[in-house]
Amino acid sequence: MKLSWRPKKLLLKETFSISYGNYDFRDALLISISYTDKIGFGECVAINYYGINLDEFILKLKEIQTKIEAKEIVHPKEFYQFLTSLNLHSFLCSALDCAYWDLYGKLENKSFSQLNYLSSNNLPESSYTISIALVDEQIQKIQNSDWQKFKVKCNGLHQNYTFKLLETGKQIALDSNTSFSDDDCNFLQNNELTRNFLYIEQPRPVGEFQVLNKNLNAVWMADEDCQNSSYLEKLQPHYSAINIKLMKCGGITPALELIREAKKFGYKIMIGCMTESSVGISAGIAVASLCDFADLDGANLISNDFARGSFVEKGKLILSENAGLGISLL
């Protein structure tokens, strides 16, 4: 096998505002693993609040390159076990794991769905992310959109205005990115109107979820609070849903395991994303049939996508039927 990589800059169509800050671009790293004439692609993105340093990733790739290139072609689950021995950050591990799934499927001339006996029907509809703004501005964006599901970013809870979002007639979720107080959470989970939100994501800072009661009116969804399956049991009294992001958990292979374990605990599952190109989004769509919700608008938010594969059109997930993850570069 041959391993290569190159930095990319993902340009956002408009400034993206969340409680952690404002962003006009994201730096990304495109990973390629090739064998004979087939090439698999994976991607990871620099997210500052996860402490990602792509220069450190490149140094790590140089360190492990000979080990990866000496590896024989094996099943992706066996390749992932090899990756776990390399002491990789989950974001970098995800890029390598996804690239290998893409390569393996292309070598076998089978799609990811065929390799894993997954249905390509009944895929969940993706939400579209609405940045932090005045509620009236957020409502205007929702009303002007062809999409039906929206994840609205919040910076703290505006109790007098938040429920106005429900008047749009669209399906609305909230994402506080840890910005809600205990009082905010109690207000929401004790208000019957809250039942009309699809879910409310990561309301409190990581580890501060004790106020959340999943048996009241809010569908609380864990994002940063749930990194892998070891978190599921302790979160169970508080959260009824989890957001699985491939980069967060380390790739497609651990995501499949996390989905299986989460279902045993009765969690609703969302496949989510960062700001990503169609490389990362194709990997997310590949597992979407196993999930209840999807938030896979990452490539729709950028103006310079450099790949094609599976995609999202007005919220509908369009799964590539091509081999592997169906990824090719433009």
Image (spheres, rainbow, N blue to C red):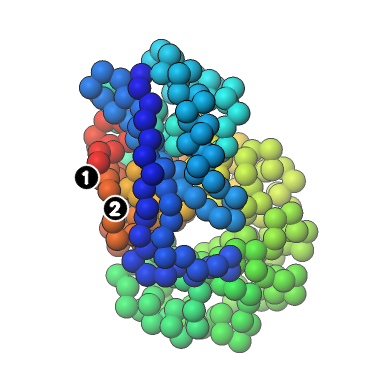
Residue 169 % position (x, y): 41, 77
Residue 2 % position (x, y): 35, 22
Q: Residue at x 69, y 63 (%)?
A: 204
Quadrant placement of the N terminus:
top left
Q: Is residue 115 left or right of residue 271?
A: left
Q: Residue at x 49, y 50 (%)?
A: 46
Using the rendered image of the protein, determine whether residue 54 is visible from the camera's viewpoint. Answer: yes
Between 85 and 150, the one lying in front of the other is 85
Q: Earlier in the sequence, mark 1 or mark 2?
A: 2
Residue beneath label 2, please?
305
Q: Residue at x 35, y 60 (%)?
A: 11
Residue 210 % position (x, y): 78, 59
**Badge 2: residue crowd in 10 Å (few <14, some 14–19, many ≥20):** many
Of helix, strand and loop, which one carries label 2?
Answer: loop
When asked about the image quadrant of residue 254, the answer is top right
Q: Are marks 1 and 2 in contact (CB under 8 Å)?
A: yes
Distance (Cα) linking label 1 and label 2: 8 Å
Using the rendered image of the protein, determine whether residue 238 is visible from the camera's viewpoint. Answer: no
Is 235 above or below relative to 161? above
Of helix, strand and loop, which one carries label 1?
Answer: loop
Taking the view exactly as shown, the residue that stands out farthest to the right is 210
Residue 304 % position (x, y): 28, 56
Quadrant placement of the C terminus:
top left
Residue beneath label 1, please?
330
Mark 1 residue type: Leu
Mark 2 residue type: Asp
Between 130 and 32, the one lying in front of the other is 32
Is 197 above or below relative to 47? below
Is 225 above or below relative to 31? below
